[in-house]
Amino acid sequence: MENMGQQTAEIILKAIRVLEVESTAISEFSGRLQKGPVGALFLKAIQYFQEVLDRHGKIIVTGLGKSGKVGQKIAATLCSTGSLAVYLHPTEGLHGDIGLVRSSDIILALSYTGNTEELVRLVPSFKQMGVRVIGLGGNSHSSLASLCDLWIDASVPSEACPYNLVPTTSTTLALAIGDAIAITLMQLRGFDSQAFAENHPGGSLGRRLSLKVEDLMHSGDAVAVVGSDASMEEVVIVSTQKKLGAVLVVQQNYLLGIITDGDIRRSLKHREKFFQLQAKDVMVSQPITALPDMKADAALQLMEDRPSQISVLPVVDGQGRWKGLLRIHDLVRSF
């Protein structure tokens, strides 16, 4: 058992070392962004990318091997944050796929060594087309660096691999820099949460940002509704029938209050007098409400960000007329 405990501790220490090595590399690059030439080059790269996007061009991301995998992720992140980007496999580029590149585009080439043969052979073709090439890697004196219009130094002291062989720290840093580029461009180009939702109609984040209260609320006959003079027996019966966890108390379609299942349970303390009570005696007057066109995400925050969470929300129009009932269960399930 003692050996198992020691082995477990060693495993955790190995994992921590990897995380610390990689986080240190990101921190060191952040420091270089603030001081020295790296920051100036990064700013220039962002300027070039923004100019291309403003001209309706696109960012072509390319790289081979692990750098290629990183490049695919960077291209995907750029697209999802409003910057048109595609990934070009260097080998396929040498055999015809370079046709997707236009003179209005810009290249982001990834290679840690800077000597990836396919990229070195491909870049001159980009240059002949008058396309700028931004390089990102760890060797500023490499063949690729010498061919690029601008080189972002993403060198790391060592890989997290104990033999300093497996691309780990270097790929993590490249990914982080790619994220920094994407999010910076996103903010500069005014790509807001609404635009993000439009770009992600099928994902949970997109649904969370685009769904409105009216898309998820229960309405019409599905909602339990009573008048203020209704007996508690009637309230219990209609609440049981509709099974939404609450009854709306209304007068001529205007919301007066709400009675939740919790309110019914608490009012049972009156024992035999319970059935002598009326809806107006138990209801919560002037409850928190939502408008039909309110974002569902905002409604969820309205229900959660309070000392005591509420599970149902009456929905009313601008004049206070009831339109439906929204349950936190439906919100959570939809997101």
Image (cartoon, helix red, strand yellow):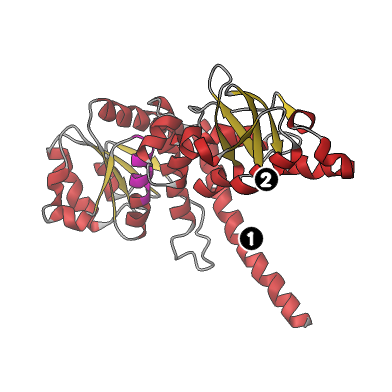
Check disc 2 and give the amino acid type: Ile
Residue for point 61% across, 31% down: 314
Q: In this view, does 236 lie to the left or right of 18?
A: right
Residue for point 49% across, 64% down: 164
Q: Does the magenta stretch include residue 42?
A: no
Check disc 1 and give the amino acid type: Ile
Mark drawn on residue 16? 1
Which residue is at the far top? 319
Q: Nearer the viewer, residue 269 or 293?
A: 269
**Residue 310 x/y as whole percent:** 69, 38
Q: What element carries label 1?
A: helix
Magenta residues (range): 73-82
**Residue 184 x/y as whole percent:** 43, 32
Is disc 1 in contact with disc 2, using a CB cutoff of under 8 Å?
Answer: no
Q: Earlier in the sequence, mark 1 or mark 2?
A: 1
Q: What element carries label 2?
A: helix
Residue for point 33% across, 45% down: 75
Q: Mark 2 points at which residue?
A: 237
Between label 1 and label 2, give the one nearer the viewer.
2
Q: In this view, does 291 lie above or below 26?
A: above
**Residue 236 x/y as whole percent:** 71, 44
Q: Is residue 218 left or right of residue 119?
A: right
Residue for point 38% across, 40% down: 152
| Magenta-colored segment: predominant secondary structure | helix
